[in-house]
């Protein structure tokens, strides 16, 4: 005998089938979104990179990681409170070139600022000229950086090749030199006497390039302050960190001025994860840094210049001749 279904039963079967098909279709759509790129990037703390080699403490550059996300990853980030931005990243050739150039400038400025701080001089604010040919008669080698020339009381910045020819024609000509060492690093600034006629024949270029410490794939200007402090510490005896784990962020100008950077809060979180004791930040961005460090053991120190940062370190336990 054949079974007989009621009208309600006959309608229920197609409904269940439609629900099942709908569920399968939704799962297929979600799977597709899981591998489909979105225009959003996830932003979070990146690696913390130690530079220099103080006796007890450490110097660390903090970074952020900006990652592309699928729509599914974006949704998870939004639900979990992870910060996302539309666009961003540095994958385009133009952006990558700009951020690489910014890192190169930060490295060069850090070398020049550190060289002058180590010599207990106020950074002069110029990038000078870089020697391209050896001049053994006056003690110059390729890579040396000539910052200024003049007499003991008045050193004028050197900006172009022509400045070497127009340097004061006097016996006591003095030149502020940042010497390049044989190990491809730069020492502290020195005042050297040299004949003006011989200086005029030195070949040098204005597009100065120097590296304080290699940072691999890190891009942008924000490592400048820490690079300058770590390099100044390495050029002098003692330990400017005072045994502390020092991290920070901030661009650096050739005169030692600290400039603002992006993603301060995430860099503070990276420092917290690395158990830093001190975090330097541009003074204008203290609020974001303080909020990110609240409830942690990291001390936020806002500064306007590398000189101010050195002063704070010296006043709170750092010990070095530049104090």
Image: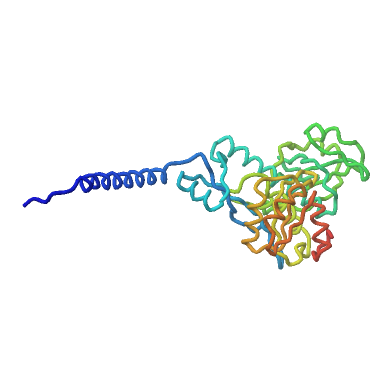
Position of residue 90 in the picture relative to residue 230 (left or right): left
Query: What is the quadrant of residue 62 in the picture?
Result: bottom right
Extreme residue in the right direction: 153
Where does residue 226 sit, x and y in percent of width and height? 71, 53
Position of residue 21 in the picture relative to residue 114 (left or right): left
| Nearest to the observer: residue 137 or residue 253 | 253
Name the image colouring. rainbow
* Image vertical order of residue 244 relative to residue 5, above or below: below
| Nearest to the observer: residue 316 or residue 85 | 85
Query: What is the quadrant of residue 86 in the picture?
Result: top right
| Nearest to the observer: residue 25 or residue 11 | 11
Where does residue 292 sit, x and y in percent of width and height? 67, 55
* Image vertical order of residue 79 relative to residue 148, above or below: below
Quadrant position of the C terminus in the picture: bottom right
Number of marks in picture: 0
Position of residue 284 in the picture relative to residue 15 (left or right): right
Give the residue at x 88% y 44%: 174
Where does residue 16 sit, x and y in percent of width and height? 27, 48
Where does residue 234 sit, x and y in percent of width and height? 74, 59
Query: What is the quadrant of residue 56 in the picture?
Result: bottom right
| Nearest to the observer: residue 30 or residue 315 | 30
Give the residue at x 86% y 41%: 149
Give the residue at x 58% y 34%: 94
């Amino acid at each position: 005998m054949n079974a007989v279904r009621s009208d309600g039963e006959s309608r229920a079967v197609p409904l269940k089938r439609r629900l099942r098909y709908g569920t399968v279709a939704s799962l297929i759509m979600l799977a597709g979104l899981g591998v489909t790129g979105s225009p959003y990037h996830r932003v979070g703390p990146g690696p913390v990179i130690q530079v220099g080699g103080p006796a007890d403490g450490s110097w660390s550059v903090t970074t952020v990681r900006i990652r592309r996300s699928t729509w599914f990853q974006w949704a998870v980030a939004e639900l979990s409170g992870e910060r996302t931005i539309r666009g961003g990243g540095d994958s385009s050739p133009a952006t990558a070139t700009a951020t690489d150039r910014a890192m190169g400038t930060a490295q060069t400025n850090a070398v020049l600022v550190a060289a002058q701080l180590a010599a207990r001089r106020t950074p002069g604010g110029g990038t000078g000229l870089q020697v391209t040919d050896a001049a053994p008669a006056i003690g110059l080698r390729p890579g040396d950086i000539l910052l200024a020339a003049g007499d003991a009381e008045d050193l004028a910045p050197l900006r172009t090749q022509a400045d070497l020819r127009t340097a004061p024609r006097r016996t006591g000509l003095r030149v502020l030199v940042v010497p390049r060492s044989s190990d491809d690093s730069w020492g502290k600034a020195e005042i050297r006497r040299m004949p003006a006629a011989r200086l005029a024949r030195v070949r040098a270029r204005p597009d100065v390039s120097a590296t304080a410490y290699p940072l691999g794939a890190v891009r942008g200007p924000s490592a400048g302050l820490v690079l300058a402090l770590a390099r100044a510490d390495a050029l002098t005896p003692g330990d400017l960190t005072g045994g502390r784990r020092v991290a920070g962020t901030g661009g650096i100008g050739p005169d030692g001025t600290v400039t603002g950077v992006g993603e301060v809060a995430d860099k503070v979180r990276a420092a917290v994860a690395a158990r830093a004791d001190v975090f330097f930040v541009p003074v204008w961005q203290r609020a974001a840094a303080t909020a990110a460090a609240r409830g942690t053991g990291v001390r936020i120190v806002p500064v306007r210049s590398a000189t101010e940062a050195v002063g704070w370190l010296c006043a709170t336990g750092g010990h070095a001749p530049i104090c």
